[in-house]
Image (cartoon, rainbow, N blue to C red):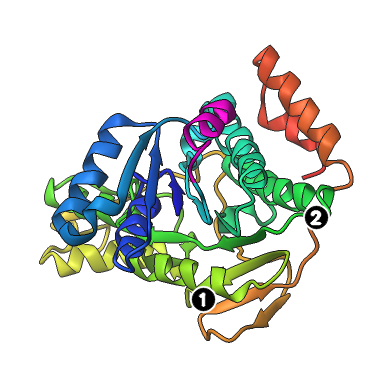
Amino acid sequence: ILITGGGGSIGGELCLEIIKHNPKKLYVLENSEISLFNIVNRIKKNERNNFSKLIPVLGDCNDYFFLKNFFSNRTIDEIYHAAAYKHVNFGEENSNSMIKNNVFGTKSIIEFSIYKNVKNFIFISSDKAVNPSSVLGYSKKFGEKLIKYYYSKNLNIKTNYTIVRFGNVIGSSGSVIPIFINQVANKVPVTVTSSKAKRYFMSISEAVKLVINSSYLNNKGVKIYALDMGDQINILWIAKRIIRLSGKTIKNNKNLNGDIEIKFTGLNKGEKEVEEIVLGDNLVTTKHKNIFECNEKIGIKYLYKDLKKLENMLKNKIIKKSLFNKLHI
């Protein structure tokens, strides 16, 4: 099994969960040396008996020739593609880097999966890929389309491609809950973008287990699954709960002597007030009560042309979000 982005929040949890089940080999691909170092130590600490099955790989999934050479004499049965830049704010200000990593990194790893005749390919997508409003959302939607495109292009392909969408995971890097807790601990205002902002939330452990289960549901072709994350939760409500559970009071016009103020900052570029998990109501139940199949079409008619446009944008270093309006995403 190969996990890309194995040092990240989702990738790291995938490593810890999968190695429990005693795989023949677990390859952890990571382009950050410190992230790779940290996940290797976590695995060693938690799964000492299976540690010999682990093979750390310091490299970039963007580098197809590196992948091809490193794995030339190694078998890969499954790939979990978790490598991605995933912060909306960074993507808005660093479009080139996010597109290069999220789109062309995905393109490279899909081509590698075809070259290696991988049995199962699991792509970690996002609720932000539905009606995207951010560079992150566009990049994830493009990744979904690339999977469909390559599967349709290679008629003899034997790989099953599973796309899994879900929202925020509690405790991941940049997650709002640790930020709120830290702000309260430091007695500074808790920053909320909008009083109406809502998000899906799920624990990393639960999300990863459902991702793995999703791959077993796909027996053929390309399938999109959405995880049941319950109802979206109002971010302002979370902020108030964290303040109160910390034994503090909210400072506002009605309580000028309160401990912690809630400050509204406004939505950042690319952010939505409310996220979506599927286009419309096209969700179909599966054998697993917490996993739904997204019954929606992935249009790929203009994908090759769009891909070439993106390549030219990268070469000329002119990727701007406004240019995505000229693509068929």
Q: Sort mark 2 into few (<14), some (14-19) or many (20+) by Cα contacts within 10 Å.
A: few
Q: Quadrant of the C terminus?
A: top right
- Residue 126 placement, left or right of 322: left
| Residue position for label 1 | 228
- Pointer 1 or 2: first along the chain: 2
In the rendered image, the residue lying farthest to the front is 73
Point out the stretch of residues depicted in magenta.
63-74
- Residue 277 placement, left or right of 236: right
The image shows residue 30 at horizontal and vertical percentages of: 39, 37
Mark on residue 291?
A: none
Q: Quadrant of the N terminus?
A: bottom left
Q: Measured along the vertical axis of the image, is residue 271 above or below residue 217? A: above
Please name which of the two marks, 1 or 2, marks the residue nearer to the observer.
Answer: 2
Q: Sort mark 1 into few (<14), some (14-19) or many (20+) by Cα contacts within 10 Å.
A: some
The residue sitting at 26% across, 46% down in the picture is: 39
The image shows residue 259 at horizontal and vertical percentages of: 13, 56
Q: How many marks?
A: 2
Q: Is label 2 in a helix, a strand or a loop?
A: loop
| Residue position for label 2 | 156
Residue type, numbered disc 2: Asn
Q: Nearer the viewer, residue 181 or 137?
A: 137
